[in-house]
Image (tube, rainbow, N blue to C red):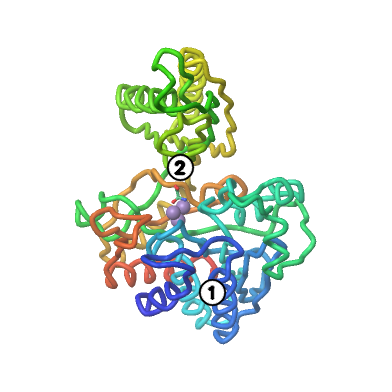
């Protein structure tokens, strides 16, 4: 069942290969309404909030909510499972748990509108909105590569609710199922990963401005080449990240060059930097090193530089009581499991700051993710679904 539904959801894409379902895009709108129809057909009370999160609710005797869900959006040319596995598992596990009659606590599915930050430089919009971190200003000032604001794209997608910046206070527990996006579980032959902490991460854009000039008539010692300066920064950054070693990761994923012409010295380069570590101090120290070294490098090449840190997510521990309970549910089901930390960011990282939160992983084939090659075995998906269903029954029917 999980595999069928995941394959179905993956048909909602704006491009191939893989899945491209970016916030407020056509495929995102269509997938979202298809999920709303499915949850309605399953007997849930379906509603949406002002940023486009969608909820499927099974009323309990208490209005306190046991929430479970993941994100609808994808990276460009991503896989079928990232986010989608958690969305489908949440819908199916809530539907299965609700077969036990009216729960003591309200069961609710959340389909978060956006987590990746692939279209707009703002990640986890959906969970940050639930956590009360998003006001109208965020939507107005955050623009995509075409200069379209989140607010304009939201309205174009027909989502017109009034943006209110307040955290939900009715969530008793939150649980997310996600693919591991790494190779540990597969390597160890483990069915389930129980996440104890989620890595902290920071994302920034670096703008390097030199002087566009003729590639042939400008001697090497008389040019201010934004590309040469940027390339030097990137290689020094990679060497420093390797010197500091695991668990630090640092990635340059995006780069724009202007005028991007074969016989013109680049006048401007913008590139991104995504770096992660389980400790806040290590992130701060690496950011300080980057800003100092990149500024010195820019000066050496006669270029100017600016930094735009557009994302800071602190390392977040998961709830140890819930994780312990999930571990015993695994033992009851003879599911092999291991505790681990997450190198990927997740909506659970944001919810973990407002309520007790657990994150469980299912294995990724060859550890591949953010790629059309992403794959998780049907048996592994069903094991994760069984675990979630048992957990919801135990937590909502006391
Ligand atoms: O980039 C991440 O950590 C996640 O896949 N959004
Ligand atoms: Mn994800
Ligand atoms: Mn992802
Ligand atoms: Mn994630």
Q: Is residue 322 visible?
A: no
Number of the front mark, 2 or 1: 2
Q: Quadrant of ligand 2?
A: bottom left
User: Which corner quadrant holds the N terminus?
Assistant: bottom left
Residue most extreme to the front: 217
Task: Classify residue 112 as left or right of residue 315.
Answer: right
Residue 164 lies in quadrant: bottom right
Residue 366 lies in quadrant: bottom left
Q: Secondary structure at mark 1?
A: helix
Q: Secondary structure at mark 2?
A: loop
User: Which corner quadrant holds the C terminus?
Assistant: bottom right
Q: Is residue 392 above or below residue 210?
A: below
* Marker count (numbered): 2
Q: Is residue 331 above or below residue 183?
A: below
Q: Residue 99, percent across and down?
A: 50, 83
Q: Residue 158, percent across and down?
A: 71, 70
Q: Which residue is mark 1?
A: 31
Q: Residue 364, percent across and down?
A: 29, 58
The residue shown at (48%, 51%) is 346
Q: Which mark is residue 254?
A: 2
The residue shown at (46%, 63%) is 20
Q: Earlier in the sequence, mark 2 or mark 1?
A: 1
Q: Residues within 10 Å of mark 2 (few under 14, many from 20)?
A: few
- Say which of 225 and 240 sits in front: 225
Q: Is residue 13 above or below residue 193?
A: below
Q: Residue 244, percent across and down?
A: 33, 23
The residue shown at (67%, 61%) is 153
The reply to whether the residue tagged 1 has its Cβ within 8 angstroms of ligand 2 is no
């Amino acid at each position: 069942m999980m595999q069928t539904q995941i394959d179905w959801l993956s048909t909602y894409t704006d491009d191939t290969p893989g899945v491209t379902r970016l916030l407020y895009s056509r495929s995102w709108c269509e997938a979202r309404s298809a999920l709303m129809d499915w949850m309605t057909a399953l007997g849930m009370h379906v509603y949406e909030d002002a940023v486009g999160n969608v909820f499927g609710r099974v009323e309990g005797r208490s209005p306190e909510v046991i929430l479970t869900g993941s994100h609808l959006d994808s990276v460009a040319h991503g896989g079928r499972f990232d986010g989608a596995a958690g969305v489908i598992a949440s819908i199916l596990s809530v539907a299965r748990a609700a077969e036990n009659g009216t729960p003591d606590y309200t069961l609710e599915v959340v389909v978060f509108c956006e987590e990746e930050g692939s279209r707009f430089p703002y990640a986890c919009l959906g969970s940050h909105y639930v956590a009360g971190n998003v006001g109208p200003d965020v939507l107005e000032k955050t623009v995509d590569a075409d200069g379209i604001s989140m607010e304009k794209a939201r309205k174009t997608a027909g989502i017109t609710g009034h943006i209110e910046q307040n955290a939900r206070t009715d969530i008793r527990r939150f649980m997310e199922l996600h693919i591991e996006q790494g190779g540990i579980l597969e390597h160890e032959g483990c069915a389930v990963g129980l996440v104890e902490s989620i890595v902290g991460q920071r994302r920034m854009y670096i703008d390097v401005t030199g002087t566009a000039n003729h590639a042939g008539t400008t001697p090497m010692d008389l040019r201010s080449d934004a590309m040469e300066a940027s390339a030097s920064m990137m290689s020094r950054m990679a060497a420093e990240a390797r010197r500091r070693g695991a668990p630090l990761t640092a990635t340059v994923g995006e780069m724009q060059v202007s005028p991007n012409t074969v016989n013109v010295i680049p006048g401007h380069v913008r590139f991104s930097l995504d770096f992660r570590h389980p400790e806040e101090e290590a992130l701060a120290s690496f950011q300080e090193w980057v800003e100092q070294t990149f500024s010195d490098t820019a000066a050496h090449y006669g270029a100017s530089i600016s930094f735009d840190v557009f994302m800071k997510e602190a390392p977040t521990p998961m709830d140890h009581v819930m994780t312990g309970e999930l571990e015993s549910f695994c033992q009851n089901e003879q599911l092999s499991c291991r505790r681990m930390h997450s190198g990927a960011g997740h909506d659970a990282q944001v919810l973990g700051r407002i309520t007790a939160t657990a994150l469980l992983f299912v294995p990724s084939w060859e550890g591949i993710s953010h790629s059309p090659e992403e794959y998780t075995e049907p048996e592994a998906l069903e094991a994760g679904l069984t675990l979630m269903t048992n957990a919801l029954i135990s937590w909502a029917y006391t």
